[in-house]
Image (cartoon, helix red, strand yellow):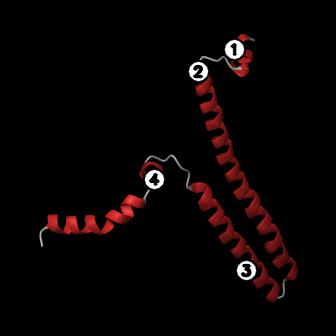
Amino acid sequence: MSSNEIFDSIKKSTKSAYDKIDKQAVFHLDEMVTPKLVTFFYWILLFAFITKGIGDIFEGDFFRGLVWVVGGSLTSRVACELMIVVFHINDNLHSINSQIKENSEAGHDSSFERDYYHH
């Protein structure tokens, strides 16, 4: 088999899967993947802290186990929420930007622009 035949067979076998992929979202970075990964990462951290805490409790150190379960769970939640907040801010800024563009293309002078530039 030549390399062209191999390439063609691979191309045919992956064609149906490739057609199902949203190429715009995957290859042009229009959609954020990290917020989904942060949620997955949070569940891993939560499982790890609870497991560590329960392990410490069964080893006889109840207070340290409790600190791991409660403190670790809260800390991981807050850290992951802070990362998600950054993405929400980004989404809000994109929507504000698109609204300003729509208003400027339509010839409307928004009150924000009027107040900002004329004072």
Q: Quadrant of the N terminus?
A: bottom left
> What residue is at 16 percent from the left and 67 percent from the top?
5
Q: Residue furthest top?
A: 118
Position above or below: 30 against 54: above
How crowded pointer 1 is (Cα within 10 Å; few <14, some 14-19, many 20+) is rated as few
Label 1 or label 2, whichever comes before in sequence order: 2
Give the CA separation, mark 2 to mark 4. 31 Å
Tags 4 and 1 touching, CB below 8 Å? no
Along the line of sight, which residue is nearer the eye, 15 or 32? 15
| Residue 57: percent from left, percent from top | 82, 84
Q: Which residue is mark 1?
A: 117
Label 2 or label 4, whichever comes before in sequence order: 4
Q: From the viewer's perspective, is the residue at label 3 or at label 1 nearer?
A: 1
Give the CA separation, mark 2 to mark 3. 57 Å
| Residue 20: percent from left, percent from top | 42, 60
Secondary element under disc 1, as helix, strand or loop, is: helix
| Residue 105: percent from left, percent from top | 56, 21
Residue type pointed to by label 2: Ala
| Residue 42: percent from left, percent from top | 68, 65
> What residue is at 68 percent from the left and 69 percent from the top?
43
Label 3 or label 1, whichever comes before in sequence order: 3
When asked about the image quadrant of residue 113, the answer is top right
Give the CA separation, mark 3 to mark 1. 56 Å
Q: How many marks?
A: 4
Residue type pointed to by label 3: Thr
